[in-house]
Amino acid sequence: MLPVTGFGKVAVLMGGWSAERPISLKSGEAVLRALKAAGVDAHGIDVGPDVLDVMRAGGFDRAFIVLHGRGGEDGVIQGALELLRLPYTGSGVAASALGMNKLWCKRIWRDMGLPTAQFLVLQADSDAPAVCRELGLPLIVKPALEGSSIGMTVVRSEAELAAAYRLAADCGGPVLAETWLPGAEYTVAVIDGEALPAIRLETSHSFYDYDAKYHATDTQYHCPCGLDAAAEQGLQQLCITAFDAIGCSGWGRVDVRMDAQGQASLIEVNTVPGMTDHSLVPKAAAAAGMDLSQLVLCILASTLTDEERKCSA
């Protein structure tokens, strides 16, 4: 592991203004504690409209981005940091924008021949019977520009489609309807080009929704995930390929569900995953033998240039 002195003064960017602000604050505090415990000169910043002024005045050397959702995971903060010429964790501007937009991401995966659930873009006047015939029932409706399962609904009848559309549309941006995949759900964290152990998610809810992610006490995280070694390696490679396909870098997480035949289908990529005590990347890292301080140092090390690495050696 690189000496912590090589990182300089680090801004941990959290909070922001998206619907995921409360989770971002929890993630940011966890990252901040872990960096400080490792001896890094880290400082938490609750990101607001004055973030560029705060960063300039603070004399920071790099940023650890823990902003979830719009404004932090969509290329906006990445572009701002590019203007300041400050290195930052995670994917760049374009990959962040692609990863945040489920529609663009799925179109790229589909065009590259990667498996992803069949989908349609919904409009207010979409023909519900036609949508249900094409995708089958149940199906799932989701906003293209939100994370943490915000605005998502499992639709089990034609009559439920309109309300599901309105809920997702209220989040802003395009609305997707996807074929429901009835199999197990898995997630794979990718750190510096390597996949961590896969986690199989098990919830009593109809799907891994916001409450199951952050509040429920009965959500189960299986790691080892229960797949045999060859199947898990195949799943990990699929997730690395999906991650690379949209130009992601540094760290992130890819979510997958199995169809009725047990075949993996890509759901989405998270370019700034959660880091709370309920979050999946720290759980996968722990299964690989890394505590939270080791994990955040590994992620932060991706911001160092080759020259900085030589100086730290």
Image (cartoon, helix red, strand yellow):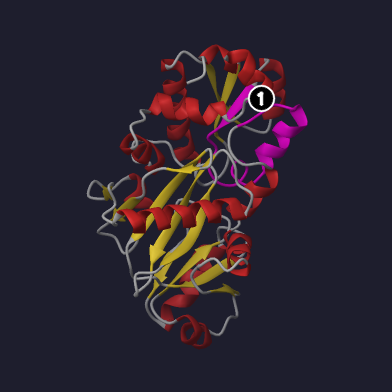
Which residue is more in the foreground, 83 or 245?
245
Instruction: Give the residue displayed 60% in from the left and 64% down from the top.
Output: 103
Instruction: Return the x and y of residue 10 as percentages of the image width and height.
Output: 58, 20
Relative image position of residue 248 (x, y in whole percent): 60, 46
Q: Nearer the viewer, residue 53 or 105?
A: 105
Q: Residue furthest right?
A: 83
Q: Which residue is mark 1?
A: 306
Q: Is residue 115 visible?
A: yes
* Residue in the picture at 68% in, 15% down: 59
Under tag 1, what secondary structure? Answer: helix
Image x and y of residue 232, in percent: 36, 54
Q: Nearer the viewer, residue 170 or 200?
A: 200
- Compared across the picture, whether 187 is left or right of 123 comes to left
Q: Residue at x 64, y 54 (%)?
A: 98
102 w.r.t. 110: above or below: above
Identify the image quadrant of residue 179: bottom left
> Please, which residue is most extreme toward the left here?
218
Q: Reply above or below: 295 against 117.
A: above
Disc 1 marks which amino acid?
Answer: Asp
Q: Is residue 282 magenta?
A: no
For the record, the magenta segment spans 62-88
Q: Looking at this view, is 141 or 105 the one in front?
A: 105
36 horizontally vs 8: left or right: left
Q: Is residue 146 left or right of residue 104?
A: left
**Where is residue 130 drawn, in percent x and y?**
52, 87
Q: Few, some or many C-alpha atoms within 10 Å of disc 1 (few <14, some 14-19, many ≥20)?
A: few
Is residue 146 visible in the rendered structure shown here?
Answer: no
